[in-house]
């Protein structure tokens, strides 16, 4: 043992990082093996001890010489896998997986599963490891089957299966199952999942928005709100649903809830709310809503919507005066663009041309502007994605002022 150890350290190969990782890992492996061998010496024949250690040293030697496939062959050829050596095999497989060498990890773990003498607990562990390999390789179907098999064998959902299965169901857009595993994660591992569960219900509604029955819709909606009463997306979906079913009063109630849930999303409700009031021919209601919100939280598109209405009700001049007043308090490119539009209508032909140059410049500028940004990772986009493509967080992308 000591002789081998010394030999490894003084071997004159290139001592770069990969070697360092392998060496640290296998020194640990060797310590574990020698401990077990020493401990079990009385129980086992000395012949087995010798052949076992020989196999591990041969495998180690291949790894150190950057011949991982030969090393894998050696480990696979080892016939005996018991509770003492299982951990070593699992660790070697996981090492390959973490290094991105998934095929080798799969070979090692598949070999484990093929052993007939594994105990139930060992087989479950091997199934889960192989599941991790397939998940890593992007083979979601196979990974799912292995995790479910492990769960079947264990009689209950093992903690290491929950997160990967949740990843799989979210990726495959199987929302009912995703909700089930998110709830398990919350119950068993005490991770707060309420925000995500609410989004899963929203996805579930969105996936069959046009086919859902009224009863089913209300059921999902109630469950989503129960999970996360602050979920803005639930209110937006509810508003959309009732607008589609021409129940504009209920839609208005849903959209107005957004202000108390997260005022940053008010801008998402201005257009549909204005439409709802118009559908109801409730001009007073619209006027009151717009000015109440303007006082409480003067969002840009609220100002733009009021500008539109003022133009309609009182003409270009009143609308232009209104937007100028608010641009002073809250400068914005979109507001400036709207103002140039109003000025163009009020000036003579010669000035109109100048304003139009300015307006087309502003339009070019706005065309590529991102209207939404993730508060977690800074990812920007032109559309409101509820699952951030940058950091994979739910509900972190918000509208931003431009
Ligand atoms: Zn993000």
Image (spheres, rainbow, N blue to C red):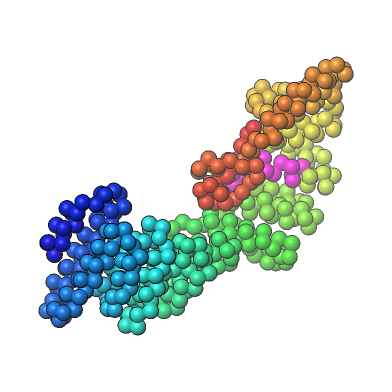
311 vs 233: above or below: above
229 vs 289: above or below: below
Residue 360 seen in this snapshot:
yes
Residue 46, position as x, y percentages in the image:
13, 78
Quadrant in the picture for residue 311: top right
Quadrant in the picture for residue 238: bottom right
Residue 360 relative to residue 201: left or right = right
Residue 114, position as x, y percentages in the image:
38, 79
Q: Residue at x 25, y 63 (%)?
A: 60
Q: Residue at x 63, y 38 (%)?
A: 370
Give the extent of the magenta segment: 260-274
Q: Residue at x 46, y 73 (%)?
A: 146
Q: Quadrant of the N terminus?
A: bottom left
Q: Residue furthest bottom?
A: 116
Work out whether residue 228 or residue 363 is closer to the camera in this orientation and state it.
363
Residue 45 relative to residue 375: left or right = left
195 vs 328: above or below: below
Q: Is residue 271 magenta?
A: yes
Residue 184 seen in this snapshot:
no
196 vs 398: above or below: below
Q: Residue at x 78, y 47 (%)?
A: 276
Work out whether residue 64 or residue 102 is closer to the camera in this orientation and state it.
64
Residue 327, position as x, y percentages in the image:
68, 24
Q: Quadrant of the C terminus?
A: top right
Q: Is residue 160 magenta?
A: no
Work out whether residue 185 or residue 380 is closer to the camera in this orientation and state it.
380
Q: Residue furthest front?
A: 12
Residue 301, position as x, y percentages in the image:
70, 36
Work out whether residue 285 or residue 271 is closer to the camera in this orientation and state it.
271
Prevailing SS of the magenta stretch: helix
């Amino acid at each position: 043992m000591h002789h081998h150890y010394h030999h490894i350290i003084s071997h004159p190969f290139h001592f770069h990082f990969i070697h360092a990782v392998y060496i640290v890992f296998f020194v640990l492996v060797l310590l574990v093996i020698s401990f077990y061998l020493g401990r079990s010496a009385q129980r086992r024949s000395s012949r087995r001890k010798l052949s076992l250690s020989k196999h591990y040293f041969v495998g180690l030697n291949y790894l150190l010489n950057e011949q991982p496939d030969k090393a894998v062959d050696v480990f696979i050829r080892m016939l005996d896998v018991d509770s003492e050596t299982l951990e070593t095999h699992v660790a070697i497989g996981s090492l390959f997986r973490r290094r991105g060498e998934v095929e080798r990890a799969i070979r090692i773990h598949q070999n484990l599963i093929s052993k007939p003498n594994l105990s139930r607990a060992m087989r479950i562990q091997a199934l889960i490891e192989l599941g991790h390999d397939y998940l890593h390789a992007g083979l979601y179907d196979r990974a799912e089957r292995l995790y479910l098999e492990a769960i079947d064998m264990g009689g209950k959902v093992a903690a290491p299966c929950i997160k990967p299965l949740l990843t799989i169901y979210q990726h495959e857009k199987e929302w009912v199952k995703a909700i089930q595993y998110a709830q398990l994660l919350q119950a068993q591992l005490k991770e707060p999942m309420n925000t995500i569960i609410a989004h899963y219900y929203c996805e579930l509604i969105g996936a069959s928005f046009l086919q859902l029955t009224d009863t089913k819709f209300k059921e999902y909606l109630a469950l989503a709100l129960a999970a996360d009463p602050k979920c803005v997306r639930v209110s937006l979906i509810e508003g959309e649903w009732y607008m589609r079913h021409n129940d504009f009063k209920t839609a208005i109630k849903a959209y107005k809830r957004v202000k108390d849930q997260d005022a940053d999303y008010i801008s998402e409700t201005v257009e549909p709310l204005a439409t709802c009031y118009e559908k109801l021919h409730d001009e007073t209601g619209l006027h009151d809503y717009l000015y109440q919100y303007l006082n409480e939280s003067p969002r840009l598109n609220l100002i733009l919507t009021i500008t539109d209405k003022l133009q309609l009700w009182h003409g270009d001049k009143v609308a232009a005066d209104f937007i100028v007043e608010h641009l002073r308090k809250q400068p914005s490119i979109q507001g400036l663009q709207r103002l140039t539009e109003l000025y163009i209508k009020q000036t003579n032909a010669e000035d109109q041309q100048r304003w139009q140059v300015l307006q087309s410049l502003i339009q070019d500028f706005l065309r590529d502007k991102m209207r939404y940004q993730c508060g977690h990772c800074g990812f920007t986009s032109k559309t409101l994605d509820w699952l951030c493509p940058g950091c994979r967080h739910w509900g972190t992308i918000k509208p931003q002022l431009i």
